[in-house]
Amino acid sequence: MTDIDNKTIDDRDEERHRAKMAKRKAVQDAEVAGKTIEKGLLIVNTGPGKGKTTAAFGLALRMLGYGKRVGVVQFIKGKWHTGEKDAFAAFGDRVVWHAMGEGFTWETQDLKRDIAAAEAAWVKVLELMADPSISLLVLDELNIALRYDYLDLDKVVAALKARREGLHVVVTGRNAKPALVEAADLVTEMGVTKHHFSAGVKAQQGIEF
């Protein structure tokens, strides 16, 4: 038995709880009723902690659950084999996936090649943004491409702000640029409280990729 099972809840406790929850519900209902805007969101997942891309794909799965169509453009991780790509393949043409990265800059060591890959990926982004069948677009590691100036920040931000009505866009990656943060509707900073890498644990299948 749990502690709550052992605790005697008398009528006064029950009534106080009911009154407290009734007040809370009234506040919550009023807050929800006050939200009247429906729009496509620009969402940024950034910060040093794990979970930025994972959270973006969670939204993609949710959108697919409602019968919507999702686009994914990967700016850096193109050469990696990932479990999520295989999983989303089960949705057929409801997921449009373009892995166009060449790897991290310290791996390629070729600035021209990195810039060319980022520019090609951005062209694909513009195509998908114009596709009315896409409800959610995940721009994985776009923040990395912007951090290293592979793309023109002002042009990217302007295009994202001018996206068609109703399109949700999620941008992932560390070190989001202030201009992108300012333009976004929702920004989540993933922090690090504890990370297994610091204990010598390597990237593992199903967790990191």
Image (cartoon, grey):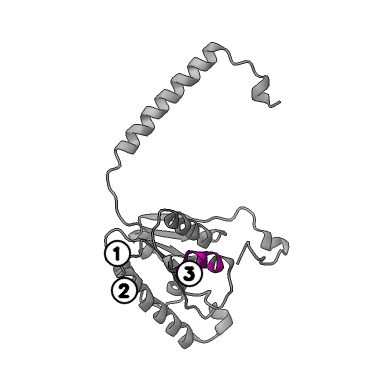
Pointer 2 or 1: first along the chain: 2
Q: Is residue 47 visible?
A: no
Tally of marks: 3
- Mark 1 element type: helix
Pointer 1 or 3: first along the chain: 3
Q: Which residue is mark 3?
A: 141
Q: Which residue is mark 2?
A: 155
The extreme top residue here reads 11
Q: Which of the two residues, 160 or 95, is positioned nearer the viewer here?
A: 95
- Mark 3 element type: loop
- Mark 2 element type: helix
Label number found at residue 161? 1
**Residue 32 in which image quadrant:** top left
Instruction: Answer few, some or many: residues within 10 Å of disc 3's Cα (few below 14, many 20 plus, some between 14 and 19).
Output: many
Residue 183 is one of the magenta-drawn residues: no
Q: Amino acid at mark 3?
A: Glu
Q: Which of the two residues, 91 or 108, is positioned nearer the viewer here?
A: 91
Q: Main secondary structure of the magenta part?
A: helix
Q: CA distance from mark 2 to mark 1?
A: 10 Å
When the figure is inspected, residue 62 is found, relative to residue 34, above or below; the finding is below
Q: Position of residue 52 (x, y in %)?
A: 51, 60
Instruction: Answer few, some or many: residues within 10 Å of disc 1's Cα (few below 14, many 20 plus, some between 14 and 19).
Output: some
Instruction: Answer few, some or many: residues within 10 Å of disc 2's Cα (few below 14, many 20 plus, some between 14 and 19).
Output: few
Give the magenta-colored segment's residue range: 85-92
Q: Position of residue 180 (x, y in %)?
A: 37, 64
Q: Amino acid at mark 2?
A: Lys
